[in-house]
Image: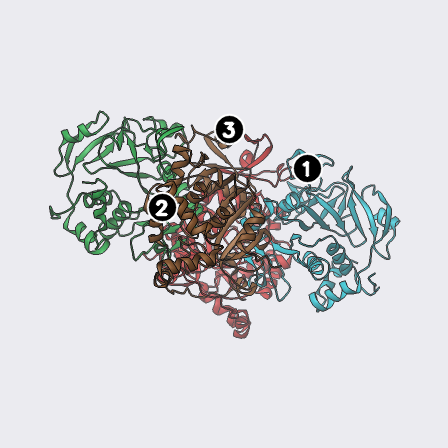
Chain colours: A green, B cyan, C brown, D red
Amino acid sequence: MSTHTSAYIKPELMACCGSREIRDHDVVIVGTGFPTMSANIAKHTHAPHATMMQESGVYDARPTRPALSVGDPCLNPGAAMVGGLIDVMGMFLQAGWVDVGFLSGSQVDKFGNINTTVIGDYHAPASRLPGSGGANPIGALARRVLIIALHDKRSLAERVDFITTPGYLDGPGSRERWGLPPDTGPQVIITNKAVMRFDDKTKEAYLASYHPGCTVDEIVKLTPWDLKVAPDVHETEPPTQEELRVIREVLDPHRMIAVYEKRGYV
Amino acid sequence: MSTHTSAYIKPELMACCGSREIRDHDVVIVGTGFPTMSANIAKHTHAPHATMMQESGVYDARPTRPALSVGDPCLNPGAAMVGGLIDVMGMFLQAGWVDVGFLSGSQVDKFGNINTTVIGDYHAPASRLPGSGGANPIGALARRVLIIALHDKRSLAERVDFITTPGYLDGPGSRERWGLPPDTGPQVIITNKAVMRFDDKTKEAYLASYHPGCTVDEIVKLTPWDLKVAPDVHETEPPTQEELRVIREVLDPHRMIAVYEKRGYV
Amino acid sequence: MSKVMSMQAAIRDHVPDGAFVFMGGYVCRPPFSAVHEIVRQQKKDLTITRSNAADDFDILIGAGCVKRFISTFISLGLYGLARCYRRSIEKGIPHTIEVEEYTNLSLPMMLMAGAMGMPFVPVKDMVGTDLMRVSSFMGEDKFKMIDSPFDGRPVMLVPALKPDVAVIHVQQADEDGNAQMWGIAGDCKWGANAAAKVIVSCERIVSRETIGKDPSRTIVPAFKVAGVVEEPFGAHPGYTPGFYDTDFGFGYVYQQASNTVEGFQAFLDEWVYGLADRTAYTQHYIQKFGFSQYKKLQAAFDWSYPVSYAY
Amino acid sequence: MSKVMSMQAAIRDHVPDGAFVFMGGYVCRPPFSAVHEIVRQQKKDLTITRSNAADDFDILIGAGCVKRFISTFISLGLYGLARCYRRSIEKGIPHTIEVEEYTNLSLPMMLMAGAMGMPFVPVKDMVGTDLMRVSSFMGEDKFKMIDSPFDGRPVMLVPALKPDVAVIHVQQADEDGNAQMWGIAGDCKWGANAAAKVIVSCERIVSRETIGKDPSRTIVPAFKVAGVVEEPFGAHPGYTPGFYDTDFGFGYVYQQASNTVEGFQAFLDEWVYGLADRTAYTQHYIQKFGFSQYKKLQAAFDWSYPVSYAY
């Protein structure tokens, strides 16, 4: 039975929540920040054979500094394979080899649809965002998609302004109707307050666990849809000492993860 | 005005006929034997900027011994690019970058269709041949196809037993109907007796020139279709001294080309 | 046949106003010297494309060179949203560009289709999302849904892209244009080969013999290349594996400058209009930030093992 | 996680009777050691494919391992028509195999489509020829003609191929299966990646660190690989760039032997059934033809220049 410590920050807890979704031998497509951190925690704890790739063309990189983009110079030397988008997004992702994808977005809705295109009307945008990049294909084709989001009414929505990346789209049966591969789709939404999972029938995100210090009521109020609560709702397991050791001694000695606190992950 | 010599063998003359079809800066897809010889004669005489590729994935090879196959070891070191079939047959040929292709076959018909699949009935073959390989796509997609054949009633036919590789198919308009690229198709049939070209209207091969020592009557008799004769039919220009010098001093000091005499090219 | 020329001549002769231009470089190897020269020559009405665009595309948009953008994503990476891009879309400054949106799967597939002479290619992403609902200058031809003639399942087809010209930056090329690259490829090989012609910007021109020592590194053959430009440091502030690192500090300089129209204009005056070419750019960089900073960007040595193609 | 195993174990565990097998090697790098082991284990009812098949496929057909062959071409190259193949088709010896015929454009495209997760892919060849008129076990699904939904033009679609297992021979791989190759590629990368799993036969096993020194040479990632077999001289009588030349003399030996059923049987007895593995094969070769002949096949040295991926 692993022992816990209370001295951790939210981004560390969220990274651990991500890590716990990863199984040994998983092939994980990552971006930067959280996802890489989560996958690396898993690799150093319960999933030593998990491997990572970046959409830019990299498989099993061995960076000696934190990658600041998915095309970062540090991803080249030492990697097992360095090809291009066609290799990773086509030959690996589209061909069905990717088990886990991490995504985040400015807006995430109850069906796990993600918006990274525009806030407001597409043709008269209040704010124009970067666009899909690799998010849409990862959301469409990765077996299990893990979504990272801030838990507030700006970041979460009943319905996103623009579906850049498919979650369960309009709900049950939508992905199948469009011919998206079976057994794919969002698995979990990890926020700074809670872990939400998707109901097998309704495909709606429900509250699975609340982070230490948060309450069910608070989370329900902060969620812009009628958030169902799991019968077995419970407190999120805090980072174990081993998880924190890996984060702080192995992966992030300079505590760069703390920047996520400034971005609201508190 | 180039001077000529009478001391040459038929395969040398045929190689020169091929060479004369090649223009400077042409991109030429070659196999082994004749085609490579022809392209190299051109490169050393009137087409210094012509470049060659082999379907296996090679561009601008620098072999130091004669290549005995399109994947020969000697094609690797020194080449400008060594990729695969997808590069040469797809990225170069299918994308429309190949000017000239050389083909030969067990049967060639009046429309320049080529058979390398089967003699007799496909389902009960008298003789089973290798198949298309790269021939069909080269015949379909190269801008100008040069065909090498023996001039007899076994090798030439009114209609081939099996169209492995498209010439003008059923005649005028056939290639267009099937959506083959405009301005592609067979340009010439070079035999051991003659040079035949294709009539713009009928798409039928007609006699353009007879090799020294051969007569129009003889050639017409040896041709299994009603061979039309060009108004300006003339004797094929023999190899020039320069062409022979290139063949014998530069390209083929061991006279390996003589083996083609044993194969009937006399 | 040598195609070596200056970047000025390459852009002048091969990137006319209104051209459809593929710009290689996914974080890795952006052809920045070419981007600056396009701005310097004030090219107009370009259609530009690449998967994951960044500051290089933002500069072209801010400088008014761009009419249309076939996009998957554009940001300043670490430094957030692309300022000029947002100003163009949100405020029409300097003008509103037309954006056709795809993804980092579908766009590379469309470039591959172009390179391979395929009329279109099936993709498994995009379906069901609002990327199907919006289209711009490609209109009805942005994609087509069909039922597969093999199994009747719905399939999205996207059209092949065939740029008029591709501009890429690679590690090395010979005078004739045979171009060799290693490290993160993005969609560089396919975008370059999809184009009617290619401008090859490279860190160093090498002999044909050097190319022939390792021909499986070649991504573009000479016959597709219209111009070869030897442009060391040509991807700065981006990086080139084996040559120099990303200049994150300069990325911050660009973010700050591009926060305002005036700041962006001043940036162009200092780093583009005010400098004749990449040599002047590099000298200005060294004078401004110091040779020690320039040196700090230069790559360490970590040689691969040689291989042999001999028989 | 090491996947290193003997060829005997690799074929036993990963090539079941009835499997659909891609065999890499277009003249270059044929996986001959694997071919001999498949014959040795008398595998049955295999479906085999590759663009431009040669003596390796002829042996599998003559030995009775093959039920179906997705073909573009098969010959003994310099030595003419493939004897066992002809006997199978013309005389039903040992039995008549089913042949589905494509071309050296369409088949590589079908393998690429399989590798890329595309359901089908458009090709511009084959149309109008008798290759459209004949089909075998693929029946109606050999190809489909459609009118392009973009411009209405006729387009041929061919289906993606997804072999159960791919067997390739490369220069080097690490214990986990990351496989690196250089020189003539044929359809090796796409065929391997189209398969559900890959058996990597290699001239030498190298460290993960060696792979990481030049990761752009990797054509198959470890997670697709089921077994890694270190098999020096494993492509003989074919060649491996940088290691050994084609053995044209041995090609003649095979041609002469395969001229008759008896000769072919004797060849199998001597070179396959009579030998336990590639080590025994190589020793037998040296004893029969002399070490000087073996040495003559070994490649000269002609090293490429190293490159760096450092920053």
Marks 2 and 1, how far apart at CA: 58 Å
Q: Relative to residue A196, is residue D269 drawn left or right? A: right
Chain bearing mark 1 = B
Which secondary structure lies at badge 1? helix
Marks 3 and 1, how far apart at CA: 29 Å
Q: Quick one: label 3, few (<14), some, or many (20+) residues within 10 Å?
A: few
Nearer the viewer's eye, disc 2 or disc 1? 2
Which is more toward the observer, D239 or A132? A132
Q: What's the amino acid at mark 3?
A: Glu
Q: Is residue C54 visible?
A: no
Nearer the viewer's eye, disc 3 or disc 2? 2
> x, y (%) of residue C301?
38, 65
The C terminus of chain D appears in which quarter of the rendering? bottom left
Nearer the viewer's eye, disc 3 or disc 1? 3
Marks 3 and 2, how far apart at CA: 39 Å
> x, y (%) of residue A119?
33, 31
Chain bearing mark 2 = C
The residue where tag 3 is placed is: C140
Marks 3, 1 in one chain: no
Which secondary structure lies at badge 2? helix
Q: Relative to residue B24, is residue C3 drawn left or right? A: left
Q: What's the amino acid at mark 1?
A: Arg
Task: Say whether disc 3 or disc 2 marks the residue closer to the N-terminus.
Answer: 3
Q: What's the amino acid at mark 2?
A: Ala
Say the numbered circle drawn on residue B175.
1
The residue where tag 2 is placed is: C257
